[in-house]
Amino acid sequence: MIILDSAERLGSAEDRLRDEFLPAVPADSVVVIASRRPPDAAWLSDPGWREMLRVILLCNLSAAHIRTLLAVEGIDVDLLDQVMALTYGHPRNVAVDRCHPPRERRDRGSTSSRRSA
């Protein structure tokens, strides 16, 4: 499996990816290319790529889905309104917020010491 994120940053290297690199990948491989924009015309106009492409649009998560995610991750579901206000339900942002919970939660139970000079 090959996963490529932020493919919109490839620029002209996208042509090499499509025309040289990917055709050399074993046929039974799975390739996932994530981008903020849809595939350009060169992907869609080529009959071989058009047949193999599967474009999936990721929509924002609903409040119900985020509530479930928070519960599964053991994060207080009372934070739902804050998470929605900060992320608008965008999947990548929700995942980042899940990894970096509010400061109060991170600091709970931790001790800090100061060194005197």
Image: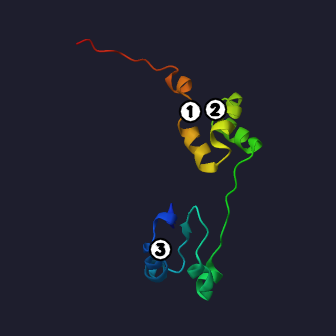
Locate residue 54, reporting x and y percent: 65, 73
Category of crowding for the residue at label 1, using alpha-carbon neighbours closer than 10 angstroms: few (below 14), some (14–19), many (at least 20): some
Write the residue at 58% across / 79% down: 43
Q: Earlier in the sequence, mark 2 or mark 1?
A: 2
Amino acid type, label 3:
Glu
* Disc 2 from disc 3: Cα separation: 39 Å
Q: Earlier in the sequence, mark 1 or mark 3?
A: 3
* Disc 1 from disc 3: Cα separation: 36 Å
Circles 2 and 1, Cβ within 8 Å, touching? The answer is yes
Locate residue 76, reporting x and y percent: 66, 29
What residue is shown with label 3? 14
Amino acid type, label 2:
Ile
- Horizontally, residue 39 falls left or right of residue 4, namely right
Locate residue 103, reporting x and y percent: 53, 26
Q: Earlier in the sequence, mark 2 or mark 3?
A: 3
What residue is shown with label 1? 101
Write the residue at 28% across / 15% down: 115
What residue is shown with label 2? 75
